[in-house]
Image (cartoon, rainbow, N blue to C red):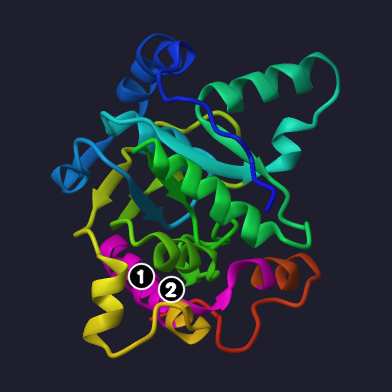
Amino acid sequence: MAHVETKSMNNGWYRFFKYVLIGPWLWLWNRPFTEGLGNVPKQGAAMVVSNHQAVMDSFYLPLVCPRQFTFPAKKEYFTGKGIIGSLQRFFFTSVGQVPIDRKAKDAGGALVETAKSVFARGDLLGIYPEGTRSPDGRVYRGRTGMARIAMETDVPVIPVAMINVAKANPIGTWIPRPVKVGVRFGTPVSPHEWARKRGLDPKEHQTMRDFTDFIMHGLAELTGVEYVDHYASEVKESLAAGNGYPEGAEPNQT
């Protein structure tokens, strides 16, 4: 099965961006706070699962964590033309992101194999189960790719809540606003133990669906926002078409 080869995390450019070029400015500008950072193991493979509020999620999360992450990213970040495209490709590769073709027939399989190669090195994989940025900061229904990785590998799953990042980096903006952001790490979950306690088979798709829902509800609670049982991509399509929120996805006005 095809997958993307990932490089070692001994990345000099990553350290340069984090500790010299970008990181110090973000610490001063957005003053990120952390909670539960001790839930991230100091070594060994794990999957860090986060809600997705903004592009800058992938900056603040690595910024506050001593260990480097590998993030799957849409392949369009790596296929740009000209000087800008080359610089973009260089940057995303340098900070540990790997291209995934979401429209490919076996995109899910490629993601799993890429994750396995990351875990084989004893590294961290960061993933956003919503698959796209939340249109309004709430936590939306997750895709099951995360759970498939979890059930096939049984690595610890660490839920992470991104706080106020949508306010610092609203959709359509590139330069963050001076809003204080936070990263809250939850208690790690053992996928197979979770399934065993509920009498579920890790190989069954319904188990993966249930595990995804469990993690997403937990992320909503950890973040302190409402959970929406709709896919964010479908809600965004409806809003873009001028049809408003689908029934049942409307923001709570109370």
Quick check: is 253 in the magenta stretch?
no
Q: Nearer the viewer, residue 207 or 240?
A: 207
Which residue appears farthest toward the right when viewing the image? 81
Q: Nearer the viewer, residue 64 or 166?
A: 64
Q: Secondary structure at mark 1?
A: helix
- Which numbered marker is on residue 179? none
In this orientation, does residue 246 appear?
A: yes
- Separation of disc 2 and disc 1 at Cα? 5 Å
Quick check: is 230 in the magenta stretch?
yes
Point out residue 191 in the picture as x, y percentages from the top left corner: 31, 69
Stretch of the chain drawn in magenta: 210-234
| Residue holding disc 1 | 215
In this orientation, does residue 168 appear?
A: no
Q: Is residue 116 above or below residue 70?
A: below
| Residue type beneath disc 2 | Thr
Q: Nearer the viewer, residue 108 or 37?
A: 108
